[in-house]
Amino acid sequence: MPQETTGVVTATVLNVRPEPNTTKPPIGQLVRGTNVAIIARSGAWYRIENGLVQGFVHGDFIKINESAPVTGFLHERPELKQVSLIPTDADGIPLPSRSTPAQRLAAGVWNSFGGMLKIVSRILGVNEGASVAIICVESSGQGMGPDGRMIIRFENHIFWKEWGSRHANEFNQHFRFNQAKRWTGHMFRQNAQSSWQTFHGRQVDEWRVFDFARGLHERAAMLSISMGLPQIMGFNFAGIGYESVEEMFNAFQGDIRYQILGLFDFIKGAGTTSPMLTALQRRRYEDFAARYNGPGQAAAYGARIASHVEAFESLKRG
């Protein structure tokens, strides 16, 4: 939490507690509209002070103020393009002799990208654990494959929308998907003599299908893939500040920094804040997941994010 972060009370009357829970009686109260300085965060609670009282209040009743509103897209800021991806030795996380899979993944993400995640998290007022957890959940910390190509997922049903519906005969020779649940049943074949095959989960096959689709219509194929660490769909290119999907593709493929900045540009948008960013700041991970991944599996995604946040924070606590 940046030292200059402030907030305003939104509840009619807000109890200030001596600890980040409701076990002990309040030590004071604040009325709606009171400005407070936010010193630290503890779970869903903020440690605050306002000159009269210092203690803990629940984050649901504090609206974060931005002391220096961050407008525009992060990937356009020159200083962020030069930030070291790897954290300093002092900020690195050693793994204990016994660790859980979630802890190992969280530590791997932080030790690979924590230099940038620390700075961007501070800019946006997001706890570092949430930044790590989203990458853990979306791509298991993998932005680039061993062959140097970024991690992608080709979506048949999106390619149908972007190109196939206008070329149905040719599309149906090579691509299939479940019409009832369009994100399922994806299959591909090279030609009419080949057998239908699934391809999700194997990057060499994802790229084989993508490259074939590029031969039919390159722009439509790029619009139909999710890209890199944040797995942002190509059709979101304008929403994260790119003039074209080709520009987004080349940036993400050229430097993993743009994948990380693209994640936060997608969360924040072009303005100073967004409902998705607010949900993340308040640790409402299910609400965040409903906006990031869609409402269908929001509870599952939210729970996975929360578990990886806890894994990261348990490591930081030592």
Image (spheres, rainbow, N blue to C red):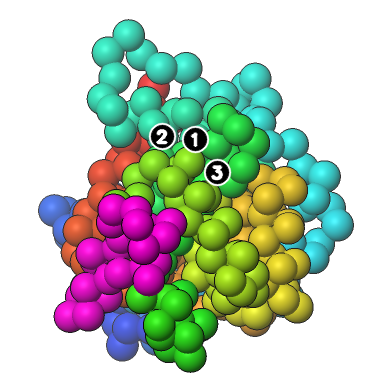
What residue do we see at 80% from left, 50% from top? Answer: 81
Residue 183 image point, x, y percent? 29, 69
Compute the Cα span from label 2 to label 3: 15 Å
Q: Which residues are magenta?
A: 173-196
Classified by dominant secondary structure, the portion drawn in magenta counts as: loop
Labels 2 & 3 near each other (Cβ < 8 A) = no
Q: Which of the two labelled residues, at mark 2 and mark 3, occupies the earlier sequence position?
A: 2
Q: Which of the two labelled residues, at mark 3 and mark 1, occupies the earlier sequence position?
A: 1
In magenta segment, residue 176: yes
Compute the Cα span from label 2 to label 1: 5 Å
What residue do we see at 86% from left, 57% from top? Answer: 78
**Of the pair 146 and 276, the residue shown nearer to us:** 146
Residue 154 is at least partly visible in this image: yes
List the single residue furthest toward the top: 97
218 relative position to 36: left or right: right
In magenta segment, residue 20: no
Residue type marked 3: Gly
Residue type marked 1: Val
State the mark number for residue 106.
2
Report crowding for label 3: few under 14, some 14 to 19, many 20 or more residues within 10 A (C-alpha).
many
Labels 2 & 1 near each other (Cβ < 8 A) = yes
Residue 195 image point, x, y percent? 29, 53
Badge 2 marks a residue whose secondary structure is helix
List the single residue furthest toward the left: 23
Report crowding for label 2: few under 14, some 14 to 19, many 20 or more residues within 10 A (C-alpha).
many
List the single residue furthest toward the bottom: 166
109 relative position to 105: left or right: right
Give the residue pinned by disc 1: 109
Compute the Cα span from label 3 to label 1: 10 Å
91 relative position to 45: left or right: right
Give the residue pinned by disc 3: 143
